[in-house]
Image (cartoon, rainbow, N blue to C red):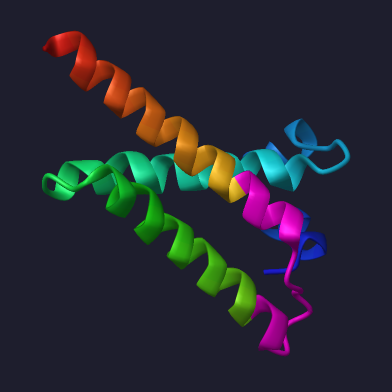
Amino acid sequence: MPGNKLKSIDKAGFSDFLNFENSDKLVHGFMFFGLAFLFQFLKEHRLLKSILVPFLISFLIEILQGIMPYGRTFDWFDLLANTIGILLAVGLIQSIKKAKN
């Protein structure tokens, strides 16, 4: 959904909280942090797969946004924010696993 449409459906007031330049990058990072975090609990994955699968999902979403006629565009900075979220989640899980051993 284009960002300018969010205010019309935001009943909780999140759009006021996230009312700063490039705030969507923070949302992207958190969403892909959550995806990568949960993906690691589906079953034991190798480290590369834990990074690569969420990244490919992110990349595919950006590509689809660029070709779909809904007012969305491919954004390299969205992809970067997604990747940072993924790397933070994988790093956190790896740190927890190391601390347990």
Indicate yes or no whether the magenta region holds residue 80.
Answer: yes
Q: Is residue 49 visible?
A: yes
Q: Where, by quadrant of the figure, is residue 70 drawn?
A: bottom right
Q: From the viewer's side, name the closer residue of 44 and 14.
A: 44
The C terminus: image quadrant = top left
Q: Residue at x 21, y 16 (%)?
A: 98
Q: Is residue 50 above or below residue 67?
A: above
Q: Residue at x 62, y 43 (%)?
A: 27
Coordinates of residue 5 in the picture (x, y in percent): 76, 64
Q: Is residue 11 visible?
A: no
Coordinates of residue 16 in the picture (x, y in percent): 79, 36
The N terminus: image quadrant = bottom right
Q: Residue at x 71, y 80 (%)?
A: 66
Indicate yes or no whether the magenta region holds residue 28.
Answer: no
Q: Is 20 on the left-hand or right-hand side of 73?
A: right
Magenta span covers which residues?
Answer: 65-81
